[in-house]
Image (cartoon, grey):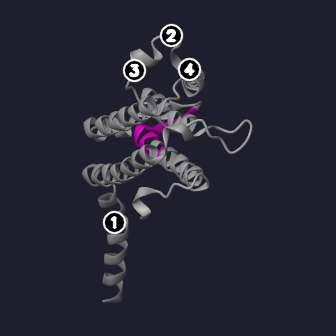
Amino acid sequence: MLRKLTIGLGLMTMTWPLGAQDPAAYKSEYLAELQYTSNNVIALAKAMPAEKYGWRPGPGVRSVSEVYVHIAAGNFILLDIIGQKAPEDLYGAVKASGRERPMALAKRNAELEKTVAEKQRVVALLERSLAAVREADEKAGAADLDKTVNFFGRDKTARAVFLRILVHVNEHMGQSVAYARVNGIVPPWSN
């Protein structure tokens, strides 16, 4: 009896992770987290007054607008890595390909951070990039998510890059919460 129980538990343990890797479950959970994060970061960007978009906590540190553009531009570069070409209207001048392309896109992202500063344009860019992430994930099938891509010199799955997008947005949303609070703005979801 004990032997059968041990074998049964061993088989359950071996098969348990397979259920956790169900692509539909991943997609549903990922999209729910992305929606939550997107709603919050956009609400925070909209709550910050336009006159505070140039505020920065100190010399050499990103301003409010630069942080939001960094999030948006980061989304586009990471989507490009998994095969969704960065928007032509923003990145048309970037002609690099292969392993050089992500670094060329990153250079363009730094330019965007310095040139897109008005609240309306920043919020629109942020919304556009988050919608692009959502659309790309919704379209991706299991094989697309398992595809191996070059992630700044390392092999990663597209799924890992999607997770990096979520982590990156949340990282800088936390930074934006601090910026907002220092400027007397309470994050809308914490009222």
Please say if the residues under marks 2 and 3 sit with CB atoms less than 8 Å apart. Answer: no
Please say if the residues under marks 3 and 1 sit with CB atoms less than 8 Å apart. Answer: no
Q: Look at the picture and state if 166 lies above or below 151.
A: below
Q: Look at the picture and state if 170 lies above or below 59.
A: below
Q: Quadrant location of residue 62?
A: top right
| C-alpha separation, residue under disc 2 versus residue under disc 3 | 13 Å
Secondary structure under the numbered disc 3 in the rendered image: loop
The amino acid type found where label 3 is placed reads: Pro
- Magenta range: 154-164
Residue 108, numbered circle: 4
Residue 166 coordinates in the image, percent (x, y): 45, 47
The amino acid type found where label 4 is placed reads: Arg
| C-alpha separation, residue under disc 4 versus residue under disc 3 | 12 Å
Instruction: Tell me if 21 is positioned left or right of 78 in this view.
Output: left
The amino acid type found where label 2 is placed reads: Lys
Viewer-closest of 174 and 103: 174
Q: Who comes first in sequence, dot 4 or dot 2?
A: 2
Mark 4, Cα crowd under 10 Å, few <14 / some 14-19 / many 20+, is some
| C-alpha separation, residue under disc 1 versus residue under disc 4 | 44 Å
Q: What residue did someone put label 3 on? A: 87
> Which residue is found at the position 69% from the left and 39% from the top?
61
Q: Is residue 155 magenta?
A: yes
Secondary structure under the numbered disc 1 in the rendered image: helix
| C-alpha separation, residue under disc 3 versus residue under disc 1 | 40 Å
Residue 164 coordinates in the image, percent (x, y): 49, 44
Please say if the residues under marks 2 and 1 sit with CB atoms less than 8 Å apart. Answer: no
Q: Is residue 70 magenta?
A: no
Residue 16, numbered circle: 1
Secondary structure under the numbered disc 2 in the rendered image: loop
The amino acid type found where label 1 is placed reads: Trp
> Which residue is found at the position 49% from the left and 43% from the top?
49
